[in-house]
Structure formats: structure tokens, C-alpha cells
Amino acid sequence: MLFTPFELKSVTFPNRIVMPPMCQYSAGEDGLANEWHFVHYGARAVGGVGCIVVEATAVEPRGRISRRDLGLWDDSQIGPLQKMVDFCRSHGTVMGIQIAHAGRKGCGPELVAPSALPAGPEQPVPRALSQAEIAEIVEKWAAAARRAHQAGFDVLQIHAAHGYLIHEFLSPLSNHRQDEYGGDLRGRLRFLLEIIEAVQKEWPKEKPLSVRLSAVDHLDGGLTIEDTIAISSELKQRGVDLIDVSSGGLMPAPIKTGPGYQVPYAEAVRREVSIPTIAVGLISQVELAEEILLNERADFVALGRELLRNPYWPLQAMTGQAEKWPEQYRRAALK
């Protein structure tokens, strides 16, 4: 199953292995991709990863997690990404990019959020966004989607997880607004739905659109898997094609981790919503990845830290498939 292709709209994924977005903190203040990104992502493409989702890429400067994050807020940022995309795609890898806004977890000096609530003890208090500012940020997501298409990406992912701006709107723990962007789940979901609608005007219909969600907040009164199933159902109706299911990140929380610890969330969304999902969470063994796919718990498996340790994990999992190795490395193929 691990090396079975998967079709989603106009895109054929050569296998089910995904490199999830992992910040490299290696861009300059200008947000431009550089040689580090080219080598980092290029090595994973050569290594046989079926789909690479490039790290959280900010839709505006104040939306960066750090001052060394990638950006797509300016046309000058298209070219360096396009060079990287072209190389990775030449090795058969489907290229995705995650566009993001850090909200109250940004690098400052101005932090914005749905409500003036800090991300945790001793964290700075953000400024609550006005409705006019919300509309401006929505358009910045759309502009970033246009640039992602111009750079040649196959898949676009909207980052709505890990305590960043969209997640801050979704969770009742961080969204205390009294207007149409707060209150019940429908109100808290409004910001994300407006982003999706704006993005779809710029992102081609034939290319897959993904959203990454934190399925649960791991905190009393926070988002539950039932909330995420309801959110995912609405996203499917709005034309989202793929849900990347993670968890946590809103505020400090007790989380029990272990191999595949987040897979049940991806499984629940897939089962209840009938939408393709990506499972993630300390997946490092071929046997575990195969079990997830074989038992239809998810459609893709994302290997984060394991692919940082070993860019050639997919090649090493291709036992007896020397013809799928890059020609330059075929002499080392595992029999």
C-alpha cells in the first residue's frame, strides 16, 4: 500500500509518503528561499518522498513564526521557490506548500489574534483584529495562493492548526469575540471559510486544496474530535480535498505521545466525513505506515522527524524495487 499511487483531482501521487511542513528557520528577513531550502527539499525528492509540503510560509511579514520563515507576501518570493519546485518535480515528487499566519504566536513586534488573549503564561498579549483587518488578511491569503500557483506547486495547504491564527479563531479557548467571527462553532469557523472562498478564486480548481487541522486541543473546553469532524464536513462541502490531521499547539497542554498517537484522529475524520486524510505523529516504521494504510485509517502517512533524520527512508523501504531508485543511486538499491 505504501507505494500504491493515489489520484486526487489532476494530481497523481506516486506513493503515500508525505513530508509534512517543518519550519527550517533558514530564510532571510526578505522571506526568500535559498540554497538551504533547495538542498533540503531536493534531497527528500531524490529520496523518493511522494509528496513534499513545504514549511509554513507566511502570507504577510507579521504572520511569520520567526524572522527567518519563508514568505509568499511578495512577487519576488516566487522565483526561488519555482526553482526548487522544478527540481523536486523532475524527480517525480508532488510539491505542496503550506501558507500560514502565526497570529499571536508570531515573532512580533505586532501580534494579532481574534481576541486579546495570550498563548500561555508570560506570553505577550496580542491585539484583537477588527473586522476590516480580518478582511485584509483574508485577501493576503488569496494573494499568497496566486503566487503558490505561479511557483508551480501542485497542492496548496491552508494552515489551520497548532495554535496559529486560524486555529485561534476556531478554538473557544482563544476566541472570545462577540461578533459574527465568534460565539458558536459556525461563527468561529467563519474566518477559515472566508479564506477558503478567497483562495479558491486564485487556486486552480483542478489542483487539490488541503487544510491542516488540530483535531483536539488536549485542554478542557477546547476543540474536540467531534468539533473537527463537523469542521471537516463543512470544509468538504466547500471544496476542500484533503485534511491533514494533527493536534494540539494552542496552549501548553498535557499530551501523551507515542508511535502513531495522532492516527485515531485522522481515522475518525476519514470515516465520518469520507474525505482523504493524512495521518501524522511519530510514524517511523514501515510496518506502522503500512498498517495505517492497509486498514484504511488514512490515505497518506506523514513522516516528519524521521525524514529529517533520513531523507532516503522511502528508498530504503522500496525493498526489491531497484527500478524505482534514482539511476545515480541504483547500485545501492536494497535487494
Image: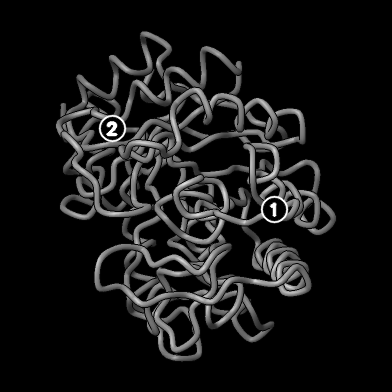
Q: How many marks?
A: 2
Q: Secondary structure at mark 2?
A: helix
Q: Amino acid at mark 1?
A: Tyr
Q: Residue 26: give x, y in percent of width and height.
A: 33, 79
208 in relation to 317, above or below: below
Q: Amino acid at mark 2?
A: Ala
Q: Residue sitting at 21 percent across and 26 percent down?
A: 286
Q: Residue sitting at 49 percent across and 33 percent down?
A: 14
In this rendering, position of residue 9 left or right of residue 125: right
Q: Secondary structure at mark 1?
A: loop
Q: Residues within 10 Å of mark 1 (few under 14, many from 20)?
A: many
Between the residue at mark 1 and the residue at mark 2, the CA separation in whole angstroms equals: 53 Å
- Viewer-nearest residue: 164 or 304: 164
Q: Which mark is residue 205?
A: none
Nearest to N terminus: mark 1 or mark 2: 1
Q: How is the image coloured?
A: one colour
Q: Quadrant of residue 85?
A: bottom right
Tell me if residue 89 can be seen. no
- Viewer-nearest residue: 332 or 151: 151
- Viewer-nearest residue: 34 or 239: 239
Q: Quadrant of residue 206?
A: top right
- Give the residue number, with chain letter if any, for mark 2: 322
Q: Which mark is residue 181?
A: 1
- Viewer-nearest residue: 226 or 143: 226
Q: Residues within 10 Å of mark 2 (few under 14, many from 20)?
A: some
Residue with the most extreme front position: 178
